[in-house]
Image: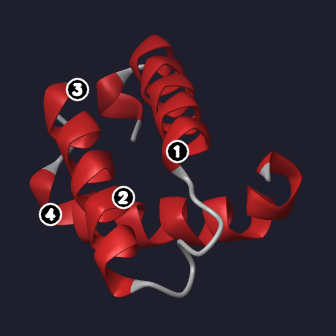
Amino acid sequence: MRELGDETLKKIAHELAESLRNNVSVDWAVRDSVRAKLRLMVKRILRKYKYPPLKQDAAVALVLAQAEALSAEWA
């Protein structure tokens, strides 16, 4: 993802972390509707920074997996 540049990737990571931290609910890992809302939020952020469309699905899956791992600390 070097074509985006390090600064852009830092901005994406920061915005994703803040948005997920503010929107993660207690039951988000279980409820499909909440997971769908978070997936949509992540995709919007990636599009905002012109993240390559072909790599977005993998990036969304990775972000949600990492958020699930970290959600215990956020709760």
Marks 4/2: CA–CA distance: 19 Å
Task: Name the front one of labels 3 and 1.
Answer: 1
The residue drawn where x is 28% and y is 71% is: 36
Q: Earlier in the sequence, mark 2 or mark 3?
A: 2
Report how far apart the C-alphas of labels 3 and 4 lie in the structure.
Answer: 14 Å
Callout 4 amino acid: Leu
The quarter of the picture where residue 14 lies is top right
Number of the label disc, if any, that sits on residue 36: none
Name the residue carrying label 2.
38
* Numbered label attached to residue 20: 1
Query: Of the residues shown, which amino acid type is indicated by label 2?
Result: Leu
Relative to 51, 24 lies left or right: right
Q: Are marks 2 and 1 in contact (CB under 8 Å)?
A: yes
Q: Earlier in the sequence, mark 3 or mark 4?
A: 3
Query: Exactly how many numbered labels are in the figure?
Result: 4
Q: Work out whether mark 3 precedes mark 1 in sequence or the reverse, and give the earlier one.
A: 1
Q: Say what secondary structure mark 1 lies in.
A: helix
Q: Which mark is residue 54?
A: 4
Label of residue 49 in the image: 3
Q: Compared to 33, does 52 lie above or below? A: above
| Element marked by disc 2 | helix
